Amino acid sequence: MKHWTENDFQKWLYGLKEEDAHLQTCSECRTELERLRLARRRTFAAPEVSEDFLAAQRRNIHNRLNHPSRNFAPLRWGFSVAMLLLVVAGLTLTPFRKSPVVLTNDEQLYSDLAAMEQTSEPKAIQPLHRLFEK
């Protein structure tokens, strides 16, 4: 019988493979299996925490509840109100710029629309022409 591969050991760890007769005869695979069992036990074992540590942790929690640290809520509200005032001021103080409406007759409008539709180049390229104009 051949030795267990790493894949076989992983399957055993996940419960997908049972121990077979090879483990009874092969000390090398049996040693590896025992090492994995020990590692699994250490992984799933509850951590050792002293009572002193837990008591100190409880005292620290009670201390924080009785003496809360500095609260920055007023500072956050102040910052939010300041930003809101800046936005409102920016919207009210900036004059609204309206583009001038140029009145044209219907014939000129239709001829401009027809000229735009009859160009052979895509509309996305038209703004690029302005970059190269002199």
Image: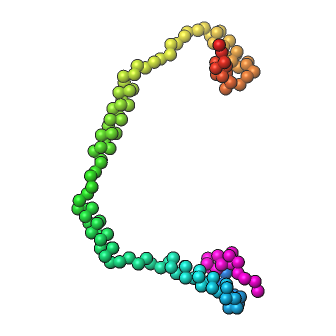
Seen in the picture, residue 100 relative to 40 is either above or below; the reply is above
Query: Measuring 70% from the left and 81% from the top, which residue is drawn there?
Result: 4
Residue 64 located left or right of residue 12: left
Q: How many marks?
A: 0
- Picture quarter containing residue 26? bottom right
Seen in the picture, residue 97 relative to 25 is either above or below; the reply is above
* Residue lying at the far left of the rendered structure: 66
Question: Is residue 27 visible from the viewing direction of this image?
Answer: yes
Residue 59 located left or right of residue 106: left
| Residue 3 position within the rendered picture, expressed as x and y whole percent measured from the top left | 72, 82
Residue 78 located left or right of residue 29: left
- Magenta segment range? 1-16
| Residue 32 position within the rendered picture, expressed as x and y whole percent measured from the top left | 63, 82
Residue 10 magenta-drawn?
yes
- Picture quarter containing residue 119? top right
Question: In front: 13, or 118?
Answer: 13
Question: Is residue 11 visible from the viewing direction of this image?
Answer: no
| Residue 8 position within the rendered picture, expressed as x and y whole percent measured from the top left | 68, 78
Query: Measuring 69% from the left and 75% from the top, which residue is drawn there?
Result: 7
Seen in the picture, residue 31 relative to 83 is either above or below; the reply is below
- Picture quarter containing residue 33? bottom right
* Residue lying at the far front of the rendered structure: 28
Question: In front: 79, or 40?
Answer: 40
Query: Measuring 35% from the left and 77% from the top, which residue is drawn there?
Result: 50
